[in-house]
Image (cartoon, coloured by chain):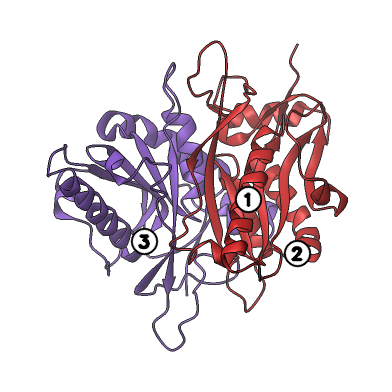
Chain colours: A purple, B red
Amino acid sequence: MVVKEYVTYNQVHKLCQEAAPRILEDFKPQLMIAIGGGGYVPARILRSFLKQPGSPNIPIQAIGLSLYEELPSTHPSGRNTPGEAEQPGTKVTRTQWLDLTSLGEMENLVGKRILIVDEVDDTRTTLEYAVKELEKDVELARQKLGGKGEKTVFSVFVLHNKNKEKKGQLPEHMLNENRYLAARTTGDVWICYPWEATDIDEHDEMAKKQPAN
Amino acid sequence: MVVKEYVTYNQVHKLCQEAAPRILEDFKPQLMIAIGGGGYVPARILRSFLKQPGSPNIPIQAIGLSLYEELPSTHPSGRNTPGEAEQPGTKVTRTQWLDLTSLGEMENLVGKRILIVDEVDDTRTTLEYAVKELEKDVELARQKLGGKGEKTVFSVFVLHNKNKEKKGQLPEHMLNENRYLAARTTGDVWICYPWEATDIDEHDEMAKKQPAN
């Protein structure tokens, strides 16, 4: 039996709020990269809590990644849609990537502190893809600058990390340097986010009936 | 005195739910363009309600637009950040635009039905910019195809439209063809969205105390 864990909007809001001081202190991000669609909501909420008086908002760039099932069919699995279990796939495709024009070319990422935001770290496949590809792009940009420029430092924030065997890996240095933050660690449960709920009142009721977490 | 209107997450969720049938029936979008950061949350919720059984999710592309104050200083106004009144500016700058690589070049937008999503239609400056620029980009792409290809049809969805004098204009044909949908029309109030709340419980309390809307 798949155990479902219901998370309300206000809980998501508070998870971001709770994580913000740690993010500000340790990661000091200058840019957020939201992995869509699940990263959109936490990234937007985080932006409010990361805002410093007198400073502009930390800009958000959204990227879109989709996991595809490899077998038996190869149609989009649809991450976390209502009524469908999340299907961990192994192939990641981009539906949106960074907009280099508005960023003033990739060079502007060189030497920056960047926070990657997603809802859930399930098989880690998507996160591995995002971190690897972003590190690759930034390294290329740094080399184009003649190898000058500081190292770009990526951190990761997710609402939930599922404590399970991962198919994807994050870079050793990211883990060693404590640049991975999950607001909550859960078992291998089915996390029901509010933005997937068909009936949000019923969703909240289900959340209320759960043991506190 | 500025009248504040508090909107809870669950109310936002229900506004999207309520709008979805109309959007599916009349706009039939094949792509959503979320104007960040405010459009992120409604776009992600809408995606759930627009999902058709057996079909993949409607993809979302995020764009980022910032309103800048023209005078006296020109630093980013920060749209709807906590504790700051929204400052209607007149200059819009892009912080992210469409990712043409993942979209398979702009040509893929030609002939499509596209839904632009934002949280609030205040002065209409941002929306005017988004619609005009997107229409321009798509028309250029259509001409590159030798003028062939169907017309791209843009629709707009916002959670709230403020009933006030607008600085920006939407195209006549969009309004004439009823391709603008605001879930609610309000007076010229200060709409407090939940993702801007520092204390979400207090925010919900304030919302509860308001006359029903």
Q: Residue furthest front?
A: B146
Nearer to us of marks 1 and 3 is 1
Identify which residue is drawn at 68% across, 55% down: B115
Task: Name the foreground residue: A70 vs A31.
Answer: A31
Identify which residue is drawn at 24% across, 49% down: A138
Q: Identify the disc placed on residue A187.
A: 3
Tell me if I can see residue A204 in this picture.
Answer: no
Residue B188 position (above or below residue B125): above
Q: Residue furthest bottom?
A: A72
Q: x and y percent of residue B111 in the render?
A: 67, 67
The image quarter containing residue B8 is top right
Q: Amino acid at mark 3?
A: Gly
Identify which residue is drawn at 68% across, 49% down: B13
The image quarter containing residue A46 is top left
- Whole-angstrom CA distance, mark 1 to mark 2, is 25 Å
Chain letter for the residue marked with disc 3 in the picture: A
Chain letter for the residue marked with disc 1 in the picture: B
Instruction: Residue under label 2, please give it.
Output: B24
Task: Name the foreground residue: A126 vs A61.
Answer: A61
- Whole-angstrom CA distance, mark 1 to mark 3, is 49 Å
Q: Secondary structure at mark 2?
A: helix
State if disc 3 and disc 1 touch (CB < 8 Å): no
Residue B1 position (above or below residue A26): above
**Could you tell whether A168 is left or right of A59 in the image?**
left
Q: x and y percent of residue B46 in the render?
A: 65, 56
**Could you tell whether B88 is left or right of B199 in the image?**
right
Residue B202 position (above or below residue B61): above
